[in-house]
Amino acid sequence: MTSTAAPTAVLVDGGYELAEGGRWVDGRYVYVDILSGRLFELRDDDGPTVRQLARLDVPLGAVAPVADRPGTWIAAAGTGMALLTPDGVLEWLDRPEDRTPRPSRMNDGVADPAGRFWAGSMAYDGTHGAGSLYRTDPDGTVVRVLDGLTIANGPAFTADGTTLYLADTAAGTILRCRIDLVSGDLGGDPETFARLSEAEGGPDGMTVDDEGCLWVAMWGAGTVRRYHPDGRLLQTLTVPAPHPTSVCLHPGGTRLFVTTARYGVASPTPASGAVLSVPVQARATAACSWRGRS
């Protein structure tokens, strides 16, 4: 295992409270600021240019593009799942967290290669076991897949869609789930892929590279980890912000985008609440789309 201080560039000093959900979509980097309900895109063809795509009146955990509907997103927002139209309107599919006993919100989410959308939830007060993992099928049905989580975070899929990695940040665990490609159901109980101590930080946003290795943003530790599919820790990169929240590999194979948070940082620097760029030699495919509601 190698451990290095990464030569990091601050692409966007946004002062974001909780930037997260970074994905590569249609030739641009897309991310959210959860608590302010904002969606952004970053284009760097001629130098980094940031544009706000939407601002909601509820928290925005993550988005994925909707197939064949340019400018429309499926969003983990507020207490459920919705379609976010190009004019910024939410068309709700379901709000399952309205039916839970604790005030809760949606958190990170991602589309899988089969065209489904997966997103986690958490209680605002961090109540143990109050979070869940949901799947939104192409017909718009929202299904609770797992419960008993605390801060469901960073869902990430292998390229073939058969394996889902899921973090419970508060519990310090990364789960690995086998997925039935046809139904989207879990193929048995999740297994524990990694268990982290408090000193190692909490696993947050994740992505899988083209070698099947898992990259993990480590909240509270100021690091990004890369794991082999067999669970071996291969690499640890140190970044200049204590709360990295999501990771996204550029398809070109030379950069890792990292979002960070100012939330909970006593003395934030320009790298806290920012988008960072770290040179790496790894690549991943672009974000998948949700294939529903055409």
Image (tube, helix red, strand yellow):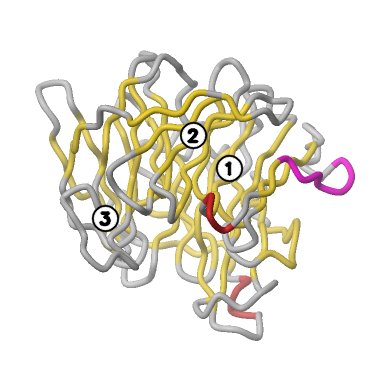
* Element carrying mark 2: loop
Characterize the local packing of mark 2: few (<14), some (14-19) or many (20 or more) Cα atoms within 10 angstroms. some
Circle on res. 54? 3
Lateral position of residue 292 relative to residue 177, left or right: left
Marks 1 and 2 sit apart, C-alpha to C-alpha, by 7 Å
Three-letter amino acid code of the residue under disc 1 = Gly
The residue furthest right is 188
Residue 165 in the image: state x and y as whole percent: 66, 40
Q: Residue at x 33, y 31 (%)?
A: 5
Residue 133 in the image: state x and y as whole percent: 67, 58
Marks 3 and 2 sit apart, C-alpha to C-alpha, by 19 Å
Nearest the viewer among 146 and 233 is 233
Nearest the viewer among 204 and 5 is 5
N-terminal of the two: label 1 or label 2?
Answer: 2
Q: Quadrant of residue 181?
A: top right
Do residues under tags 1 and 2 come within 8 Å of each other at their CB atoms? yes
Q: Which residue is mark 1?
A: 292
Q: Quadrant of residue 214?
A: top right
Nearest the viewer among 132 and 233 is 233
Q: Which residue is mark 2?
A: 67
Characterize the local packing of mark 1: few (<14), some (14-19) or many (20 or more) Cα atoms within 10 angstroms. some
* Element carrying mark 3: strand
Three-letter amino acid code of the residue under disc 3 = Ala
Compared to 287, does 223 lie above or below?
below
Q: Residue at x 56, y 53 (%)?
A: 153
N-terminal of the two: label 3 or label 1?
Answer: 3
N-terminal of the two: label 3 or label 2?
Answer: 3
Residue 186 in the image: state x and y as whole percent: 82, 44
* Element carrying mark 1: loop
Q: Which residues are magenta?
A: 187-193
Query: Which label sits in the foreground, 3 or 1?
Result: 3
Three-letter amino acid code of the residue under disc 2 = Ala
